[in-house]
């Protein structure tokens, strides 16, 4: 009975993982990179590397930003200030201009954003536009080229399959922890199974946590029936009660001076026990109904929901303090969401999360390869016994998808970073061009894999990914002044830039080792095949001699 249940879980584990493994591989790769999305964004904006080291206080940066907004957008309906933080890149301002007078009703104003110097308030010259790490973060749950709602349903469906695969995998492998300490190289299917077991058990708590919390982040999308039943379909009332936010009235149409920001920042910091602000939103600046909302910098806690305070923009009186007394259910969701995002983690813990994410990528990849290797070996046995000469369509398709997803995706990631350095800085729609090149490179790799899904294609694409990744620090030397020779050996510039270069270099070396090992294995098999043919020839000659003697 127990053995039959375990076998039924083996079937479930195989197919629940195989059917969605290629989407899961993309989600794991992009999600793993998202742990350092701020650092990736900083690397992709080399013009900000020098300003990153400029040290200013929050009060100074806020006053500089306010002065710049008063000069650049005095008639704007709303101002935004994003203050420099430990992992942030620079001081950013934004504003929403009012729509033209002849515009149709309900026309929204235009949003403008600039990165400014925290000392002078001037716009940083020639800062390239890029989505940076934000593209990779959005990619792991919004995908691309499709409505976000569809993408989140697809990713949620795959995440549910992933959760089923993890649980059924634990049940299936009755010696899973013993097998973790066992690796038998050069054993074909057995070696891939050992690698799959090791990468799965190595970070099993992480895999369970990241999959389950990923589903929790969008639970109101996947399971809306409780809210619909309790609030009779009025989801707006539910969100207003559970996630209260600042309420802003309409402009009064009467000019009034804006209250100074420094006392408000001081009051907010004292209320938050010394935690500084990270962002400021000013509604109806210069109007009698102006309001100022100050958001707190993320605390090193598990809950991702951060408090904010709203003040009267003219008198400076406190109007409300949001997200400070959370209910038990909301706090639990905030903790689970915070576990998934990992914002609470210090650099060392984020590096550990990154390694666990890479382990998840390897787990998905080895699982996909294991099925193909097992099926290919069964086909070879049947062929040796006089079975069909050609492999089935399903096996060929899976092998091609494995190459396109597992070996092709690193090519796409590296192309995205190369595009950031090589495209003209002043190019129109530059972020779109970078993202399009990501998918163009991936598409080419996938098409080539469909044409020739064999070991040579595996080796070629792994070498291409390795060369592109290892070439990123090299192209940095010729395109920026913050390459490894400066950020590492001369101890100048942000350390995160050096960390990025070293990470992609290590990934490139890992891909090169895989490609080299694949080529070495191919030569060994050729040599073994020649020896086998030589033995067959000797045997035939001996048989002929015996026949002549007879």
Image (cartoon, grey):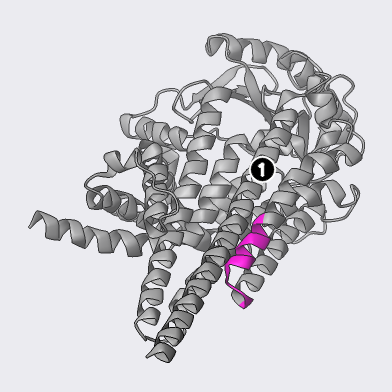
Question: Image point 27% across, 47% down: which residue?
Answer: 170
What element does badge 1 sit on?
Answer: helix
Magenta stretch: dominant secondary structure = helix
Depicted 397 relative to depicted 131: above or below: below
Q: Quadrant of the N terminus?
A: bottom left
Q: Position of residue 316 (x, y in %)?
A: 65, 17
Image x and y of residue 87, in percent: 67, 26
Front position in the image: 61 or 313:
61
Q: Does 173 sit above or below residue 351?
A: below
Quick check: 353 above or below 96? above
Residue drawn at (73%, 61%) of the image: 436
Q: Which residue is mark 1?
A: 509
Residue at 72%, 38% in the rendered image: 41
Across and down, in percent, residue 447 comes to: 65, 73
- Whether residue 283 is visible to the viewer of this picture, yes or no, is no
Q: Is residue 323 left or right of residue 437?
A: left
What range is drawn magenta here? 451-462
């Amino acid at each position: 009975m127990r053995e039959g249940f375990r076998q039924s879980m083996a079937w479930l584990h195989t197919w629940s993982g195989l059917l969605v493994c290629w989407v899961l591989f993309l989600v794991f790769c992009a999600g793993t990179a998202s742990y350092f999305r701020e650092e990736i964004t900083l690397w992709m904006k080399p013009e900000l590397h020098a300003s990153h080291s400029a040290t200013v206080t929050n009060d100074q940066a806020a006053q500089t930003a306010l002065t710049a907004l008063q000069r650049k957008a005095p008639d704007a309906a709303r101002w935004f200030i994003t203050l420099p933080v430990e992992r942030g890149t620079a001081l950013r301002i934004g504003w929403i201009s009012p729509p033209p007078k002849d515009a149709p009703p309900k026309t929204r104003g235009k949003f403008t954003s600039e990165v400014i110097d925290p000392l002078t308030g001037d716009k940083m010259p020639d800062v390239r536009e890029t989505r940076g790490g934000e593209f990779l973060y959005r990619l792991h749950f919004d995908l691309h080229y499709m409505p976000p709602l569809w993408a989140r349903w697809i990713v949620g469906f795959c995440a549910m399959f992933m959760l089923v695969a993890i649980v059924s995998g634990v049940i299936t492998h009755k010696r899973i922890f013993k097998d973790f300490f066992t690796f038998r190289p050069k054993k074909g299917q057995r070696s891939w199974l050992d690698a799959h077991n090791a990468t799965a058990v190595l970070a099993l708590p992480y895999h369970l946590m990241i999959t389950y919390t990923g589903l929790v982040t969008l639970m109101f999308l996947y399971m809306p029936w409780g809210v619909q039943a309790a609030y009779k379909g009025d989801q707006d009332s539910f969100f207003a009660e559970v996630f209260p936010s600042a309420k802003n009235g309409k402009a009064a149409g009467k000019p009034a001076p804006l209250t100074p920001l420094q006392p408000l920042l001081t009051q907010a910091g004292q209320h938050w026990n010394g935690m500084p602000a990270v962002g400021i939103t000013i509604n109806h600046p210069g109007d009698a109904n102006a309001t100022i909302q100050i958001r707190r910098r993320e605390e090193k806690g598990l809950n991702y929901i951060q408090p904010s305070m709203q003040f009267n923009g003219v008198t400076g009186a406190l109007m409300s303090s949001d997200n400070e007394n959370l209910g038990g259910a909301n706090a639990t969701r905030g903790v689970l969401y915070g576990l998934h995002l990992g914002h609470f983690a210090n650099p060392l813990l984020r590096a550990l999360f990154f390694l666990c994410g890479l382990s998840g990528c390897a787990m998905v990849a080895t699982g996909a390869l294991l099925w193909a290797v097992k099926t290919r070996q069964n086909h070879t046995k049947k062929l040796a016994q006089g079975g069909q000469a050609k492999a089935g369509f399903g096996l060929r398709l899976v092998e091609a998808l494995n190459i396109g997803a597992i070996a092709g995706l690193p090519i796409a990631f590296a192309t995205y970073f190369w595009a950031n350095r090589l495209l003209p800085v002043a190019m129109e729609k530059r972020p779109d061009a970078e993202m399009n090149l990501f998918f163009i490179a991936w598409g080419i790799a996938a098409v080539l894999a469909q044409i020739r899904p064999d070991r040579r294609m595996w080796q070629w694409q792994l070498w291409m990914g390795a060369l592109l990744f290892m070439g990123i620090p090299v192209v940095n030397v010729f395109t920026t002044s913050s390459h490894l020779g400066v950020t590492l050996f001369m101890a100048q510039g942000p350390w995160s830039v050096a960390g990025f270069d070293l990470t992609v270099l290590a990934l490139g070396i890992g891909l090169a080792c895989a490609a080299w090992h694949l080529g070495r294995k191919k030569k060994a098999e050729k040599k073994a095949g020649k020896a086998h043919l030589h033995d067959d020839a000797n045997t035939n000659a001996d048989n002929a001699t015996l026949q002549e003697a007879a």
